[in-house]
Image (spheres, coloured by chain):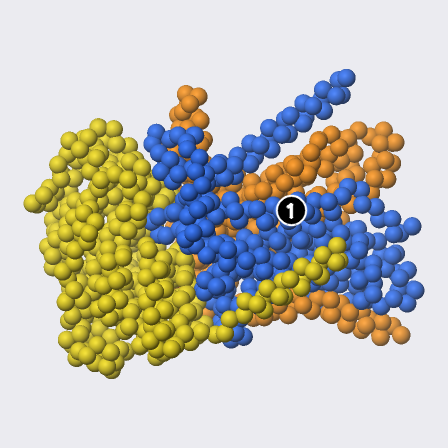
């Protein structure tokens, strides 16, 4: 046994030293969100060739993204560049890109800011308020209500082509689908922002339009929650998703569900995995028409990363990543986007239309909730509380009024509003 | 003469524990202490400055008894532990007896089977069981329907979810403790058994009056380890139920994790960790004292 | 005759129990050989087309070989270190009479009570300062110090190695180091085997620690690779199952290889 022991030890030492890599110059951190890795690898390699610098691509599992970023930031070794979904929590670490914009893009800062915030108007507000430009808008995705065309045909339901459904019409469609044999007419992503969509379209939300009052327990918000509870209680939506965290895609993928409330980031996965005809329905409306566009930003966190950040967001590279992931590039001069894949193109058109027609009032509230420097932190710091609140209602532990009032009071307290 | 003997022993003792000691100090104790001070601040990733707030965090913790609170998650963890420790102890002992018994054939094969769950990562265990128990497409419900019974909403009802969380955790660790018991059982010399059977004791009596007491050190180890495991359990449960339905399977570590990494309230999370540490320390010391008394 | 029947009956019951016991795992393995859409078909099908598509996808589209290589390096190296230092510590805590013994014992115990999640940020800080991020050192060395290993060794040495052996060696003039290598270690075969198996399993399945240390695909281990198949709303089941099945194999091999050393009736003959 001793002999094998030493042989194994020797082999190990050899393997370790054979794999020693010299430290890389620049690190670029990202998580996998579709077929993006090959595109990044290609663009990074081109950058290395052009500049002679070495770039290390760091890949972090999505579920642990925030945790790893927090660790790296706190530990003093942030990635030089990161592809992020959120900048609010990075406000202490982000750099001001203002002095570099002319140099890398040839545009004046204000002109550039207008160009890149074509879908991310909140970013413009945020930057102006903060007095600095913390990141480069990258790609945008939009909420979308996908549906299985074949199941709809079977149930004899027509989707609205020139208008939108009301929430009630949407509910009726669900009943019809259930009658025609669909197990769960709708499946809904387990995410606070996907839930919040419902609040906004009912006229509710968290902060009000002035950013001074909390309206989470208003009549409208409670009504929205009651609807959410109703469709779960009647088994029109699989309870396992929100209550125990079951992954939603599988329901839509195999025909257990006819509709899937998610977003355009799912498009590459759909193209790869769905084997039925699918499309998108305009988001249903209650009192206000609303859809949410989120997306990614490229955030340089050190001086060394700034060049790479601008490189990744130049027109050419932006076009490449956008078409690979079926996302919208964040540039006003690149809004004419068409995709070859027919279903993707259709879905995209629907989502864009929703975006153009979103009510300004709802948008204002959304911005206060998730993006405003002063009012967003208290909502962002309660994300798990929001999910808990919804789950407590769905399990009948609390009534909608109770649950929402509790959380509203807690948020008021934290925001110093009492 | 006496003095130098003692100090020689001291030096030898320290020498032998040095590698472990250094590593623990650098990678566990030092980080724990440096994170300790955070518990007294309101540090959050979303704010630009953090302030010293004394015992505020602890006040917050101890004044919240809502179902998603830290205190309730602690209570749940205790209940879980109280069930997990004895059941996993006796169950793994049972497995060990089977896999070291003379009557049973093919013991190596059986040992491998029982150890198998432990080889899987907690994530895989959780996903496999979730799927096994899936309401619509899980093996269990399919079989139930085939024999004409109602499929059950296994993970959507609080009591059922808690039940399964406990069962799956025990299933997962039983092989691990079985290995420990095996190591101990196989080191009991044959003479001991021979002497006993000469005296006319049957198998059952032999086991409880001779074998079991000889397993004492391992038993203590298993009990202490399983208690610590139960209190620290997170990864498996989180992937399995995410703490649901509602909060009914949310244990302490999950609460700390969510507060720190989803709400960014690192100061509050640190305070919760401090509480958890002392609870665990207290429980373990109690357990040790109890064991020592028995001797 | 009666006895023979009872033996057969007991064996049958035990085997049925054992097979039911591992049913969820078998289900996982079988499922890795089915198409993803068949897995989620409704109405559900228990049997469907056999396919190797998932395995092909894993091998072609992921850096699986690199992950496996890294896992092997880290796991084996860490296990070797664990065995050595756990035995050392176990010997000290079990047999050497030194004053601060109880203090250190409690200290080691207390490190078990601090869950990793709770001190992660501070650990990362330390790792970053000593330059062990994205290195094998960071992956191998810190986890090698395991309190459980120390306890296992301590308890075993305490109960299975009689003090007389050590005393008689001391009288013969042996120092502690000699006693350790010549007497203790050879007698520790069962616990070495147990430590080997356990440590291999722990290191192979470590997820949070590698996540902390490594973000570069060059150093990723199998568990990290597996995590990349799970996004927020999708789980690439087919690939996940295939990679899981593959990742089970090394640990099974190690377990089977060390089975021999769990021999029954190891006598403590060295007394006589």
Look at chain B in the picture and name its colour. Answer: orange
The image shows a total of numbered marks equal to 1
Residue that badge 1 annotates: C255
Percent across and percent down for residue A88 are 29, 67
Residue A316, placed above or below residue C148: below
Residue B181, placed above or below residue A361: above
Look at chain C in the picture and name its colour. Answer: blue
Residue A220 can be seen in this image: no
Quadrant position of residue C96: bottom right
Instruction: Say which quadrant the N terminus of chain B sits in.
Output: bottom right
Extreme residue in the left direction: A162
Q: Which chain is painted in yellow?
A: A
Q: Nearer the viewer, residue C216 or C194?
A: C216
In the picture, measured across the screen, residue C161 lies left or right of residue B83, that is: right
Q: Residue at x 86, y 60 (%)?
A: C166
Percent across and percent down for residue C35 are 39, 38
Q: Secondary structure at mark 1?
A: helix
């Amino acid at each position: 046994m001793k002999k094998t022991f030493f042989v194994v030890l020797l082999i190990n030492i050899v393997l370790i030293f054979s794999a020693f890599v010299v430290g890389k110059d620049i690190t670029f951190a990202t998580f996998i969100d579709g077929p993006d890795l090959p595109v990044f690898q290609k663009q990074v390699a081109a950058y290395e060739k052009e500049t002679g610098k070495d770039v290390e691509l760091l890949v972090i599992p999505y579920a642990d993204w925030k945790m790893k970023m927090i660790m790296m930031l706190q530990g003093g070794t942030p990635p030089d560049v990161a592809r992020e979904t959120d900048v609010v929590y990075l406000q202490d670490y982000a750099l001001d890109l203002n002095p570099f914009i002319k140099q890398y893009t040839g545009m004046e800062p204000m002109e550039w800011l207008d160009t890149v915030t074509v879908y991310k108007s909140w970013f413009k507000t945020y930057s102006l308020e903060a007095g600095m430009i913390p990141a480069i808008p990258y790609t945008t995705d939009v909420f979308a209500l996908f549906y299985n065309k074949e199941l709809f045909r079977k149930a004899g339901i027509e989707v609205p082509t020139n208008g939108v459904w009301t929430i009630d019409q949407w509910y009726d469609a669900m009943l019809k689908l259930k009658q025609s044999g669909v197990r769960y007419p709708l499946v809904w992503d387990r995410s606070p922002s996907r839930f919040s969509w419902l609040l906004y379209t009912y006229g509710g939300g968290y902060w009000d339009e002035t950013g001074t009052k909390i309206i989470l327990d208003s009549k409208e918000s409670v009504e929205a929650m009651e609807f959410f509870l109703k469709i779960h209680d009647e088994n029109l939506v699989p309870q396992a998703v929100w209550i125990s965290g079951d992954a939603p895609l599988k329901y839509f993928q195999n025909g257990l569900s006819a509709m899937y409330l998610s977003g355009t980031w799912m498009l590459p996965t759909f193209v790869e995995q769905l084997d039925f005809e699918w499309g998108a329905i305009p988001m249903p409306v209650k009192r206000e028409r609303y859809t949410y566009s989120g997306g990614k930003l490229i955030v340089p966190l050190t001086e060394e990363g700034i060049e790479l950040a601008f490189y990744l967001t130049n027109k050419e590279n932006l076009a490449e990543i956008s078409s690979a992931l079926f996302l919208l590039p964040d540039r006003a001069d690149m809004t004419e986007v068409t995709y070859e894949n027919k279903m993707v193109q259709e879905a995209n058109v629907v989502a864009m239309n929703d975006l153009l027609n979103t009510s300004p009032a709802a948008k204002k509230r959304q911005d206060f909730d998730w993006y405003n420097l002063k009012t967003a932190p208290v909502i962002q710091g309660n994300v798990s509380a929001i999910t808990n609140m919804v789950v407590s209602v769905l399990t009948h532990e609390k009534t909608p009024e109770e649950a929402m009032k509790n959380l509203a009071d807690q948020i008021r307290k934290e925001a110093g509003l009492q | 003469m006496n003095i130098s003997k003692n100090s020689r022993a001291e030096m030898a003792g320290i020498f032998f524990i040095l590698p472990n000691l250094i590593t623990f100090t650098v990678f566990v104790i030092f980080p724990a202490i440096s994170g300790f001070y955070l518990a007294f601040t309101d540090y959050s990733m979303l704010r630009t400055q953090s302030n010293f707030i004394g015992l505020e965090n602890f006040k917050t913790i101890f004044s919240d008894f809502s179902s998603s609170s830290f205190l309730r998650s602690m209570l749940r963890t205790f209940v879980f532990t109280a069930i997990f420790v004895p059941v996993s102890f006796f169950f793994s002992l049972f497995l060990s007896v089977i896999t070291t018994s003379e009557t049973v054939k093919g013991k190596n094969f059986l040992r491998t089977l029982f150890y198998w769950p432990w080889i899987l990562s907690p994530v895989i265990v959780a996903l496999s069981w979730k799927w096994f128990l899936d309401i619509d497409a899980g093996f269990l419900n399919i079989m139930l329907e085939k024999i004409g019974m109602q499929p059950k909403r296994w993970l959507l009802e609080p009591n059922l979810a808690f039940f399964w969380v406990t069962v799956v955790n025990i299933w997962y660790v039983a092989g691990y403790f079985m290995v420990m018991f095996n190591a101990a059982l196989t080191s009991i010399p044959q003479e001991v058994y021979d002497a006993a059977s000469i005296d006319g004791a049957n198998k059952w009596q032999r086991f409880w009056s001779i074998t079991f007491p000889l397993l004492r050190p391992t038993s203590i180890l298993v009990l202490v380890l399983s208690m610590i495991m139960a209190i620290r359990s997170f990864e498996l449960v989180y992937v399995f139920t995410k703490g649901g339905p509602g909060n009914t399977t949310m244990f302490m570590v999950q609460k700390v994790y969510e507060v720190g990494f989803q709400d960014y309230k690192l100061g509050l999370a640190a305070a919760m960790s401090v509480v958890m540490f002392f609870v665990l320390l207290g429980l373990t010391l109690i357990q040790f004292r109890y064991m020592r008394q028995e001797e | 005759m009666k006895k023979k029947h009872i033996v057969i009956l007991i064996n049958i019951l035990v085997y049925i129990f054992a097979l039911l016991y591992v049913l969820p795992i078998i289900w996982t393995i079988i499922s890795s050989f089915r198409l993803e859409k068949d897995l989620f078909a409704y109405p559900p099908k228990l049997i469907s087309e056999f396919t190797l598509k998932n395995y092909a996808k894993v091998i072609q589209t992921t850096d699986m070989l690199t992950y496996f290589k890294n896992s092997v390096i880290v796991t084996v190296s860490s296990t070797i270190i664990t065995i050595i230092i756990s035995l050392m510590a176990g010997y000290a805590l079990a047999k050497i009479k030194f004053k601060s013994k109880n203090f250190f014992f409690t200290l080691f115990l207390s490190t078990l009570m601090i869950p990793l999640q709770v001190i992660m940020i501070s650990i990362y800080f330390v790792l970053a300062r000593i330059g062990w991020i994205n290195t094998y050192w960071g992956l191998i060395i810190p986890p090698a110090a395991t309190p459980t290993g120390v306890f296992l060794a301590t308890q075993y040495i305490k109960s299975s190695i009689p003090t007389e052996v050590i005393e008689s060696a001391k009288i013969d003039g042996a120092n502690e180091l000699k006693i350790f290598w010549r007497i203790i270690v050879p007698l520790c075969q069962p616990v070495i085997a147990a430590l080997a198996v356990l440590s291999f399993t722990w290191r192979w399945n470590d997820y949070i620690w590698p996540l902390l240390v490594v973000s570069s695909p060059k150093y990723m281990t199998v568990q990290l690779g597996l995590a990349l198949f799970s996004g927020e709303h999708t789980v690439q089941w087919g690939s996940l199952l295939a990679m899981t099945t593959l990742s089970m194999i090394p640990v099974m091999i190690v377990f089977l290889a060390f089975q021999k050393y769990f021999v029954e009736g190891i006598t403590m003959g060295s007394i006589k």
